[in-house]
Image (spheres, rainbow, N blue to C red):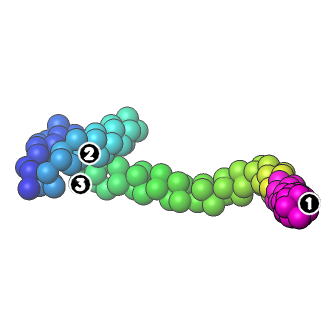
């Protein structure tokens, strides 16, 4: 397990993480620190804990928005793809029909070739 010292609002915190996850942990700490800076920019904040709570609330609000957005945003994207999907299904159906017709022709040609070969053998 790796030990990483992160800085949030200028204060160091040593935390453990899985080996190889140090960069990810530093990125998360940077995101938290960015939210703390947003809270500080609003002014009139008293106390470290209050600032961290407000930063956490900002992050929770962003997570909430992201959880809602895919549900709202996915439907139009799926609708946009529906005509393309229908066209591809129709193309596939036509291709399958042509393949079946071609196979039927090949079977008839093979049967006719056998008939001709058999007729030639008897003459």
Front disc: 3 or 2 = 2
- Mark 3 → mark 2, Cα distance in angstroms: 24 Å
Query: Is residue 83 something one can see in this rendering?
Result: no
User: On screen, 90 above or below 43?
Assistant: below
Pointer 3: residues within 10 angstroms few (<14), some, or many (20+)?
few
- Checking the image for residue 24, the label placed there is 2
Q: Nearer the viewer, residue 17 or 89?
A: 89
Earlier sequence position, callout 2 versus callout 1: 2
Residue at 14% x, 51% y: name it. Answer: 19
Magenta segment, prevailing SS (helix, strand or loop): helix
Q: Over which residues does the magenta segment extend?
A: 95-123
User: Can you tell which mark lies on residue 30?
Assistant: none
Secondary structure at numbered mark 1: loop
Residue 109 magenta-highlighted: yes
The answer to whether residue 30 is above or below residue 14 is above
Q: CA distance from mark 2 to mark 1?
A: 84 Å
Quadrant containing the C terminus in the rendered view: bottom right
Q: Which residue is mark 1?
A: 123
């Amino acid at each position: 397990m790796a030990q990483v010292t992160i800085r949030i609002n200028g204060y160091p915190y040593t935390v453990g993480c899985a080996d190889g996850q140090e960069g990810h942990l530093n990125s998360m700490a940077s995101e938290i620190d960015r939210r703390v800076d947003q809270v500080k920019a609003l002014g009139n904040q008293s106390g470290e804990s209050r600032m961290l709570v407000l930063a956490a609330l900002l992050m929770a609000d962003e997570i909430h928005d992201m959880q809602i957005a895919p549900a709202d945003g996915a439907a139009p994207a799926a609708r946009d793809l529906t005509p393309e999907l229908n066209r591809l299904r129709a193309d596939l159906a036509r291709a399958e029909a042509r393949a079946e017709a071609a196979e039927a022709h090949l079977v008839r040609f093979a049967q006719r070739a056998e008939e001709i070969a058999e007729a030639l053998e008897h003459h």
